[in-house]
Image (cartoon, helix red, strand yellow):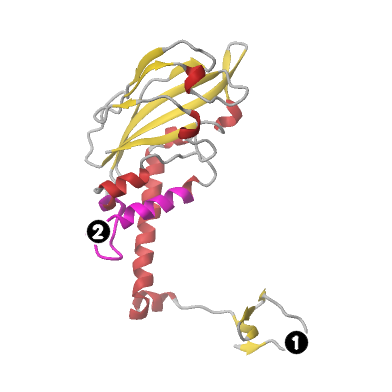
């Protein structure tokens, strides 16, 4: 390491040299790093290895969930959903109070009420949160994943985006095993309503089947908005206003 005593106070990397400011002034050092073999074997880096194992596990868990609900995710997501989900999965992993550091898992975290609470209410499209556009109570059947609405009046219950004429509602139930990476997903038929309709309607959104797996059960709720033009419904801005929310974790 050398001290930069020139007139130009440089910060950054230039070729093989890195210039930076410290409490001792502007310093310069050659580029370098710790070898992979040392990180993998040196006792001084045991925490680094533990963190690396757990980080790999939570990123994989995020992908497992995204893959499991891909048909839904194609309709409602934002550009940062992957990183946002990893952050939540890290919190779920931290709820694992039985595994040793470095071996904590999302699967074990989801066996706790605390771990489940981190994922419940997660919005896959942070541009439109469910709580900001739906103002009607829903009854969730935790066994079948069915969602029931009573006296649902779209004009009063929904804050629809400007230009939309219709909203479509759908429920889904998934069983996701984060250890084996096996998953099942079943969805209901779409219920499409006019957003300006003030008539009260009662209906159930019932997924086509019940998963038989032994992983964690999730119930999802999807709202998608469209505009009718000459009798045909078109998605609003390619789904920018659509909502996909984890309404229950079982």
Q: Position of residue 181 (x, y in %)?
A: 31, 46
- Say if 213 sits above or below 100 in the image: above
As for residue 94 lying within the magenta part, the answer is: yes
Residue indicated by mark 1: 6
As for residue 218 lying within the magenta part, the answer is: no
Closer-to-camera residue (147/172):
147
For mark 1, give the secondary structure: loop
- Say if 248 sits above or below 84 in the image: above
Name the residue at 49% across, 19% down: 156
Closer-to-camera residue (102/37):
102
Name the residue at 45% across, 16% down: 153
Name the residue at 34% across, 77% down: 41
Name the residue at 65% across, 84% down: 25
- Residue 97's label in the rendered image is 2
* Residue numbers of the magenta segment: 83-108
Q: Position of residue 240 (x, y in %)?
A: 57, 33
- Say if 13 sits above or below 52 in the image: below
Quadrant (top left, top right, bottom left, bottom right) of the N terminus:
bottom right
- Residue 122's label in the rendered image is none
Residue 2 in view:
yes
Report, in whole angstroms, how far the alpha carbon at label 1 lies from the one at label 2.
Answer: 54 Å
Q: Quadrant of residue 45?
A: bottom left
> Relative to residue 30, is residue 106 drawn left or right?
left
Q: Where is residue 11 in the image (x, y as percent from the top left)?
A: 68, 75
For mark 2, give the secondary structure: loop
Choose the circle earlier in sequence order: 1 or 2. Answer: 1
Q: Answer few, some or many: residues within 10 Å of disc 1's Cα (few below 14, many 20 plus, some between 14 and 19).
A: few
Q: Position of residue 7 (x, y in %)?
A: 78, 84
Residue 75 in view:
no
Q: Are marks 1 and 2 in contact (CB under 8 Å)?
A: no
Between circles 1 and 2, the one closer to the viewer is 2
How many callouts does the rendering have? 2
């Amino acid at each position: 390491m050398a001290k930069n005593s020139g007139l130009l106070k440089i910060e950054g990397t230039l070729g093989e040299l890195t210039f930076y400011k410290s409490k001792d002034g502007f310093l310069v050092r050659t580029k370098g790093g710790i070898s992979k073999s040392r990180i993998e074997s040196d006792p001084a880096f045991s925490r680094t290895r533990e963190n690396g194992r757990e980080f790999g596990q939570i990123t994989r868990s995020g992908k497992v969930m995204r893959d499991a609900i891909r048909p839904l995710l194609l309709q409602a997501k934002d550009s940062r959903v992957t990183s946002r989900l990893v952050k939540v999965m890290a919190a779920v992993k931290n709820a694992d109070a039985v595994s040793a550091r470095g071996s904590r898992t999302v699967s074990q975290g989801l066996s706790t009420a605390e771990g489940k609470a981190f994922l419940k209410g997660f919005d896959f499209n942070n541009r439109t949160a469910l709580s900001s556009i739906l103002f009607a109570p829903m009854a969730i059947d935790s066994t079948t994943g069915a969602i029931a609405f009573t006296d649902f009046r779209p004009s009063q219950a929904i804050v629809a985006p400007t230009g939309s004429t219709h909203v479509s509602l759908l429920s889904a139930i998934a069983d996701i095993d984060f250890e084996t990476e096996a998953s099942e997903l079943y969805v209901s038929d779409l219920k499409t309503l006019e957003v300006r309709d003030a008539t009260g309607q009662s209906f159930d959104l019932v997924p086509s089947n019940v998963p038989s797996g032994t992983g964690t059960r999730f119930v999802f709720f999807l709202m998608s908005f469209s505009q009718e033009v000459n009798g045909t419904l078109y998605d609003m801005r390619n789904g920018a206003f659509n909502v996909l929310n984890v309404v229950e974790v079982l």
